[in-house]
Amino acid sequence: GTSDLFATCSYEDIRVWHTPTQKELLRITVPNMTCYAIDFLRDGSGIVSGWDDSKIRVFFPETGRLMYTINEAHKKGVTAITATSDCGRIISGGGEGQVRVWRVQERVAKSGQKTFVTELEEAMKEHANAVSCIRVSKDNTQCVSASADGSCIVWDLKTFHRKQIMFSKTLFRCVCFEPEECQVITSGTDRKISYWELYDGTLVRELDGSRSGSVNGMDISLDGQYFVTAGDDKIVKVWRYAQGDVTHVGLGHSSPIMRAKICPNNRLIVTVSDDGGIFVWKFPF
């Protein structure tokens, strides 16, 4: 929940950056592996990461030392990952389409050394293709997963059953809850930004997110008034949520943008592109 740090992941490493100085603070290296997805634990105690060797690795953020590993987490690599705000569960998505919920418990040995015990709580099998994005609700009772199979599913994290499903003729790349959690917005390869009503799964609004190429990255501000999109057209766009119009455009990337995030204090936007470029933009409002 801090705006002074952000992390990026790629082939062989995870890097933690200090926003005010724009310097690299930490580099965590795993040789010959690609990190697909990362998330900070909300209390700052760890960096959770999903890798192409099907492992979930969690690192200490101060030293980069390995805290624990979950082996064989998914069959075709761990393509999406997030953690609940109480840091008690990790939710991962895989290349085979499963969404898995892992419970993490900390144990202290008599010697005083901490160990972590992880167990698979549930494997939710509905998606037929890779899971591209997972978001958890504020109260940790539900999560939403977007997949390349053209479906977006809301899961109940108590019963582990599907609450709602949304279909579209697209490979979904990203999904976000709006802050009141009555709606989600999705985007993907059809270049559309779609607003969905959660209680019945209906499509209530569709915007043209881009003129060319897919929308790969999206994030919504904490107050829900604005959201940011970015994608293959190399353009960063800031939208008003209620009005559905673009207020600001950022040009600078020279290759497709893969991810976009708004920092928690609403001051900055961070975008990363295919060529390894990391851009930090001033949030316009």
Image (cartoon, rainbow, N blue to C red):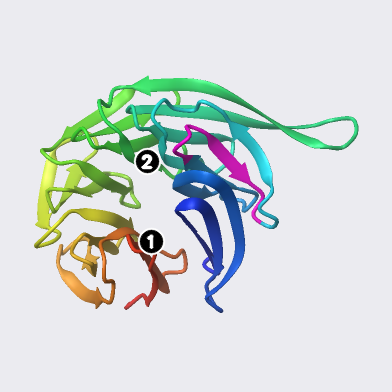
Q: Is residue 191 left or right of residue 275?
A: left
What residue type is disc 2 on? Ile
The label number, if any, that marks residue 134 in the structure image = 2
Which span is picked out in magenta? 51-61
The location of residue 214, given as percent across then percent down, is: 18, 53
Q: Answer few, some or many: residues within 10 Å of disc 1's Cα (few below 14, many 20 plus, some between 14 and 19).
A: many
* Residue name at image x 29 percent, y 22 percent: 126
Compared with 174, 151 (above or below) is above
Q: Amino acid at mark 1?
A: Lys
Q: Residues within 10 Å of mark 2 (few under 14, many from 20)?
A: many
Tell me which residue sits at (53%, 36%) in the image: 56
Distance between the Cα atoms at labels 2 and 1? 14 Å
In the rendered image, the vertical position of residue 23 relative to residue 105, given as above or below: below
Secondary structure beneath label 2: strand
Label drawn at residue 68: none
Instruction: Give me the residue at 26% from left, 66% from top.
Output: 255
Residue 137: x and y in percent read 41, 42
Q: Nearer the viewer, residue 220 or 58?
A: 58
Point out residue 160 in the picture as x, y percentages from the top left corner. 40, 22
Camera sees residue 141: no
Look at the image and tell me in which quarter the C terminus lies. Answer: bottom left
Above or below, 51 relative to 238: above
44 and 213: which is toward the camera: 213
Is 93 on the left or on the right of 235, as rendered? right
| First reached walking from the N terminus: tag 2 or tag 1 | 2
